[in-house]
Image (cartoon, grey):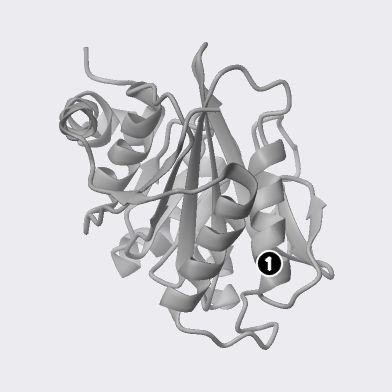
Amino acid sequence: MPSGSEVRAEFTDPAENLAFDEALLREGPTGPVVWLWRNPVCVVVGRGQRIAREVRVDECARDGVPVLRRASGGGTVFHDPGNLNVTLVLPGPAPRPLEMLGLVMSAAVEKLGLPARIGDRGIFVGDAKLCGFAVFRTKDVLLAHSTLLVDTDAARVGAYLTGPPPDPKPLDSHRSKVASLVDHGVRLRLAEVEDTVRAAAAGLLGPLPPREPTAGELERQQSLLWSRYEFPDWHAEGRQRS
């Protein structure tokens, strides 16, 4: 496999983060790419999900919590600065698209001293979900990303997401009890957690030297902001600007 890299990029707006996340896929890298990032407080729904089934809309409006849509599938998640996002982009077809992400994140969790169990769409410690997974791919490139709850308050997660619906649909989120690293007694600085994830990824994928975003990635991000992530209909209904 061609040599990989870790993108070092920080954006303060959740729409910019989601656009850059997809841009890494669309640019079609030839080797593995890892990106670690965080969002301010927001709720992010999966590509085909219906907001009314997933989100406590009135509570989000009351507290000024934006609701956004990403390009990948998977369930709805609550983001805040205590929730570390890990994006992994891999070239080539992947018959088991979440396999490498699961290996990276379980290795990271075990390096943090916790027993990791890969379960339904994420990693669990005991009966509580610590990491959630989602995936999106083109014909030639796979993007898989994970959340890692570092010190997010579990009560805040439940405050903005709905409970299990009485009439489950295929695209509905699978609600699980959640707990952060802090809840499990792991109290590390964010930089230490990030370094642990980097070490786990490098151990499985080879060296991942840091780099700045390429001009192509940033241009693609701007294009995706225009067509999707700064277009209200994308977030509300999944329709992009043509």
Residue 195 place in picture, x, y as percent: 48, 68
Q: Secondary structure at mark 1?
A: helix
Location of the N terminus by quadrant is top right
For the point 42% across and 37% down, the residue is 70
Total labels drawn: 1
Q: Amino acid at mark 1?
A: Val
Location of the C terminus by quadrant is top left
Q: In the depicted view, which residue is nearer to us: 67 or 97?
A: 97
Residue 101 sits above or below residue 181 on the image: above
Residue 23 place in picture, x, y as percent: 31, 31
For the point 40% across and 43% down, the residue is 5
Residue 98 sits above or below residue 84 on the image: above
**Crowding near pointer 1: few (<14 within 10 Å), some, many (20+)?**
many
Residue 227 sits above or below residue 177 on the image: above
Residue 136 place in picture, x, y as percent: 53, 28
Q: In the depicted view, which residue is nearer to us: 198 or 184?
A: 198
Q: In the depicted view, which residue is nearer to us: 153 or 97?
A: 97
**Residue 88 appears left or right of 38:** right
For the point 23% across and 47% down, the residue is 212
Quarter assignment of residue 126: bottom right
Quarter assignment of residue 236: top left
Residue 28 place in picture, x, y as percent: 38, 21
* Residue 228 visible in image: yes
Q: Which residue is mark 1?
A: 109
**Residue 77 appears left or right of 100:** left
Q: In the depicted view, which residue is nearer to us: 216 or 42?
A: 216
For the point 24% across and 45% down, the residue is 16
* Residue 162 visible in image: no
